[in-house]
Amino acid sequence: MPKVYFIIVTYNAMKWAERCFTSLRQSSVPIHCIVIDNGSGDGTQEYIRTHFPEVDFIQSEQNLGFGKANNLGIEKAYREGADFFYLMNQDAWIFEDSVRQLIEVYQNDPEQHTIGIMSPMHLDGSEKKMDLHFENYVAQDARNNRFLSDLYFGETRPSYEIRFVNAAHWFLPKKTVEKVGGFNPYFFYGAEDYEYINRTSYFGLRILVCPESKVVHDAVQAFHKKQPENHEELLKQKRLSMMMQRETKYLNPGYDYNIKREKAAFVSSIAKMGVKGNRSEYRFYVDQYKYFSKKFKEIEAARKTSMTGNHPFLNL
C-alpha cells in the first residue's frame, strides 16, 4: 500500500476542524496527516491535539503564509518516505473512497510518468453541487477534452486533462515533488497555485481531474468578493491584482523573460499615458516600474531555481 501524506495548513480552522479531520480517519486508504498551524487564535491547536492525537502537528512561530507552510509539511513527508502528497485546504474534507479512487487512476494510467497533479471533483459545502470555482476551471477546457459531454451521457473516462485547478485538493506523486518542488516563497498568499501549475506544465507534466473521486471544498460560492463602495479602494484592489498577475507571468519559466525588455515596456507605457494626459494611469505605471525595478533580480533568481528540476524551493 503506498504511503499517502495529507498536508494541511491551518489558520483559525475551528469552523471545519471536526469535519475535516474526522473524514481522514474514515478513509478506506490509511493516511498520515501533517498540520502546519500559522498562528491560530481560535483554539485550533488545542482542539486538534486533543481530539486528533494521530495528527503530526507543527506550530509555526509566525504566519508563514500558504506556500512556505505547505513546504514544511512536504519536506517532512518526503523525509518520512511519502509516495503521494495530498495538499488539502482547512475548509475541506474527503469521503471514504476519495483517495483510493485517485490511486487507482494513477496506477492504471498508461502514462503515469507524465502525471504532475491529480484532482478529485470538488463539491461545495452542501455536498449537492460542484464548487463554483472548480466548475469554472473544468468548463474552460470542456471543448478540448469533452468532459462535460461525457459526464452528461454517463460515459466518463478515468481522468481528463485540464490547464488549471486550485490547490484546495491536490494529489501529487512523489516524482512531482522531486521535479517541480515546493511552492515558490516569492508569494505569501494569493497566486501560489497558478505559479506551481506553470512550473508543472513547463516540465511537461499533466494536470488531471478524476471524475470518480469526490471531495468537498466549503469555500465562499462567489467569483468576486464584496466590492468596496469607495472607488479609490476598488481601483487599488484591481491594480494589486494586475501586479500579481504580472508577477505570475514573469515567474513562469515558460515565459521569455528579459529584464531589459520589461523595463522598456514600462517606460513606453509611462510615456504613452503622459502624452494622453491620463494622470492616474501614468502614476500607476510609474509606481509599477519602481516596484518591479526592485523585484526584477529576485524574480530572475526564483526563475532559475524553479527551472533546475531538483526539488526547487524545498530543503531536501
Image (cartoon, rainbow, N blue to C red):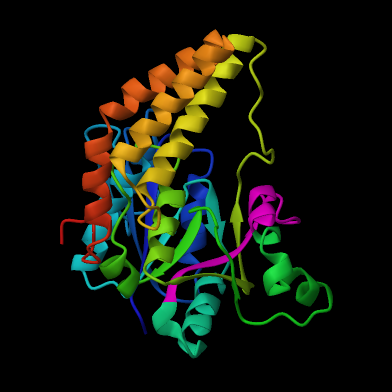
What residue is rendered at 38% in x and 46% in y? 9
Q: Position of residue 164 (x, y in %)?
A: 54, 58
In percent of width and height, residue 276 lies at 58, 14
Q: Is residue 3 left or right of residue 101?
A: left
Which residue, as the protein is rendered here, is positioned at the far left? Answer: 316
Q: Say if residue 183 shows up in the picture.
A: yes
Q: Is residue 209 left or right of residue 115?
A: right
In front of the other: 69 or 245: 245
Residue nearest the observer in this picture, 45 or 192 = 192
**Residue 10 as seen in the image, left or right of residue 23:** left
Residue 179 falls in which quadrant of the image?
A: bottom left
> At 35% across and 81% down in the image, what residue appears?
2
Q: How many marks?
A: 0
- Going 34% across and 69% down the picture, which residue do you hit? 176
Asked if 232 appears above or below 207 in the picture, the reply is: above
Q: Position of residue 42 (x, y in %)?
A: 42, 30
Q: Position of residue 93 (x, y in %)?
A: 54, 56
**The magenta segment:** 115-137
Q: Determine if the magenta segment contains residue 116.
A: yes
Quadrant of the image occupied by residue 79: bottom left
Check the picture and name the quadrant holding the N terminus.
Answer: bottom left
Confirm whether the magenta stretch covers residue 84.
no
Asked whether the viewer can see residue 13, the reply is: no
For the residue pair 235 and 276, the one nearer the viewer reads as: 276
Outermost front residue: 275
**Is the C terminus in the top left, top right, bottom left or bottom right quadrant?**
bottom left
**Left or right of 274 in this view: 174:** left
Residue in view at x 53 percent, y 17 percent: 273
Name, please, the residue furthest toward the right: 153
